[in-house]
């Protein structure tokens, strides 16, 4: 069975540094198209940061035409203000993607680490190291936020090979839509 190519935009949201990755996923092969960060550290105004994030995501969409967005969900931290800012950055990124009618998928940090390394407790460095080996891609000049974004995109690809947009209501529909999964 041939799986059509999908372009996935992976986002590691942040108001100081936002990681992004664009990958191509076809026939269980993943190719990194672009990967990097948007640095917002010099900008002091929080609302201006959100505007820049929105415009940057739109520019990525216009350039790469992703089929889906995968984004890391905010995690609970001791500092509630940091969590709120992270949630705003995530919301703005999702709004930009939804404004172009692109489906969005959210994954917890633990789920992402587990999908890439097999352990939900892996360090950022372990995730980056495994991605480098798995995809033959170097993060030498990139931050861990970029590798985190790539991990989010890879996590999305490594989920079920079935469409995540299709709700399965019974076994008969699942089997008819996924004959390759029957053993």
Image (cartoon, rainbow, N blue to C red):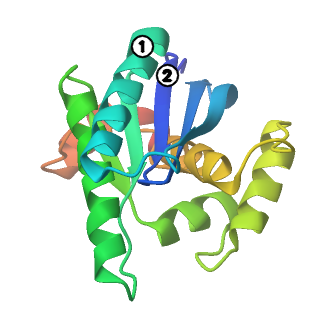
- Residue 126 percent coordinates (x, y): 77, 66
Residue corresponding to mark 1: 65
What residue sits 35% from the left and 66% below the top? Answer: 74
Q: Quadrant of residue 178?
A: top left
Q: Give above or below for 172 relative to 58.
A: below
Q: Is residue 23 left or right of residue 58?
A: right
Are the residues tagged 1 and 2 within 8 Å (C-beta)? yes
Q: Quadrant of residue 97?
A: top left
What residue sits 27% from the left and 25% below the top? Answer: 102
Using the image as rendered, state which of residue 28 and residue 168 is in the foreground: 28
What residue sits 64% from the left and 25% below the top? Answer: 34
Label 1 – label 2 distance at C-alpha = 7 Å
Q: Is residue 68 left or right of residue 92?
A: right
Q: Give above or below for 13 relative to 30.
A: below
* Mark positioned earlier in the residue sequence (1 or 2): 2
The N terminus - image quarter? top right
Residue 7's tag is: 2
Secondary structure beneath label 2 = strand
Q: Quadrant of residue 21?
A: top right
Q: Nearer the viewer, mark 1 or mark 2?
A: 1
């Amino acid at each position: 069975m041939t799986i059509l190519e999908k372009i996935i935009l992976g986002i590691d949201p942040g108001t100081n540094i936002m990681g992004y990755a664009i990958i191509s996923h076809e026939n269980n092969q993943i190719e990194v198209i672009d990967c990097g960060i948007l640095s917002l550290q010099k900008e002091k105004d929080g609302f201006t940061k959100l505007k820049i994030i929105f415009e940057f995501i739109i520019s990525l969409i216009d350039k790469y035409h992703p089929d889906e967005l995968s984004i890391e969900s905010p995690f609970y931290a001791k500092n509630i203000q940091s969590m709120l800012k992270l949630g705003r950055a995530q919301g703005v990124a999702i709004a930009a993607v939804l404004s172009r009618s692109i489906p969005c998928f959210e994954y917890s940090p633990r789920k992402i680490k587990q999908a890439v390394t097999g352990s939900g407790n892996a360090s950022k460095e372990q995730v980056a190291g495994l991605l480098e080996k798995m995809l033959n891609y170097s993060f030498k000049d990139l931050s861990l936020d970029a590798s985190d974004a790539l991990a989010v995109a890879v996590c999305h690809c490594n989920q079920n090979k079935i469409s995540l947009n299709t709700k399965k209501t019974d076994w008969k529909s699942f089997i008819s839509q996924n004959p390759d999964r029957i053993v």
